[in-house]
Amino acid sequence: MIDNIIREDIEKIKSELKEDDFAEKKVLITGGAGFIGSWLCDVLVGFGAEVMCVDDFSTGRMKNIDHLTKNPKFKLIKSDVCAFQSRDKFDFIFHMAGHASPDEYQKHPIETLQTSSFGSANMAELARKSDATLLLASTSEVYGDAKIVPTPEGYWGRVNPIGPRSCYDEGKRFAEALLVAYHKQYGLDVKIPRIFNSHGPRLREDGLYGRAMSRFIMQALANKPITVYGDGKQTRSFCYITDTVTGLMLLTISDDAKGEAVNVGSAQEVTILELAKKIKEMTQCSSSLTFQPLPQDDPRRRCPDTDKLEKLMGWKPKIPFEEGLKRTITWFSSKGTT
Ligand SMILES: NC(=O)c1ccc[n+]([C@@H]2O[C@H](COP(=O)([O-])OP(=O)(O)OC[C@H]3O[C@@H](n4cnc5c(N)ncnc54)[C@H](O)[C@@H]3O)[C@@H](O)[C@H]2O)c1
């Protein structure tokens, strides 16, 4: 689905990039029917790239990309990334496939680990055969419950290897190590953005797929209680989708970022309670706040140190927290519930 907010935001992203860097390139996007992946599909097709989207629709949605399916520059392949084979050669591979919602990945820990391990190994081999640039969607969760916040890339992480989140964070840590090994051994051009919480149109809000931001907004729009985990003093930083996608695409073409892990996210740290209150205020809802037990191993603080991103790219996320939040709320309120 493409609407005015998404259309405007795609143009905003395109205005920050150079068309020539992507036009006519052959691009593979795994997880292209998902939240972030579908934005990449839109921007790259908009730039005249030839895009192949591989998705198993485990968490992705056809409605995110159905407007692209008639475009001759866009090809959709329904497949598990672990099994996907291709004789095509690509310039860029964006490996976005993954299970990003904590409730959902904890329900599917084996598939989550397989996508990060076998799926990443499959993409690394394909990139090597193509001599493609390979970008892995890594995550702030590789830092676990970080002791240093804002967290720089040099921080090694504090992760419970057998905890409920380990399928996700250890899977991504393995994928990072694998890509760095391909870079060292074969000179493959790999990019490892560690993405911090992103939000915007197409973020799933339903059932196990919902994230705190989308869940709170939907609860507020329905005047239902907003469910905060723990005391709400845990922090996150929320990056609007235009900034996330711009950061990923700039990283892809950067020579200075070859073989590097780079934080991509907003440096504005907010508590979950502040987020809930801000959503209450902006939606003018009558929802109460209710408190539920904090899930095991939930990180207390999460906020990126973005110095490396700024130094390498000469760019940093631009959309202030309230502005991005307003846009996400406007989008959810215009589309109603699913
Ligand atoms: N959204 C965030 O805030 C965030 C933060 C950190 C990292 N990430 C990472 O970015 C990537 C995209 O996240 P998202 O928020 O767009 O999630 P999403 O769930 O919306 O998208 C993931 C896509 O991958 C697909 N997929 C999952 N396993 C697959 C497999 N084995 N084979 C083929 N397709 C598969 C899903 O169907 C979905 O379309 C993920 O890898 C996630 O770990 C996201």
Image (tube, grey):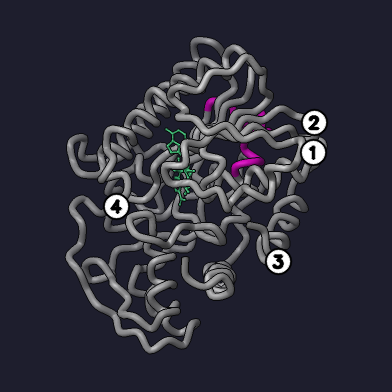
In which quadrant is the N terminus drawn?
Answer: bottom right
- The residue that label 3 is drawn on is 4
- The residue that label 4 is drawn on is 103
Q: How many marks?
A: 4
Q: Is residue 176 left or right of residue 336?
A: left
Q: Earlier in the sequence, mark 2 or mark 4?
A: 2
Residue ID at (38%, 67%): 215
Q: Earlier in the sequence, mark 4 or mark 3?
A: 3
The quarter of the picture where residue 90 lies is top right
- CA gap, disc 2 to disc 3? 26 Å
126, 209: nearer the viewer = 209
Dot 4 and dot 3 residues touching (CB under 8 Å): no
What kind of residue is marked 2?
Glu
Q: Secondary structure at mark 3?
A: helix
- CA gap, disc 4 to disc 3? 31 Å
Dot 1 and dot 4 residues touching (CB under 8 Å): no
What number is the disc on residue 307?
none
Residue ID at (63%, 48%): 66
The quarter of the picture where residue 41 lies is top right
Q: Earlier in the sequence, mark 2 or mark 3?
A: 3
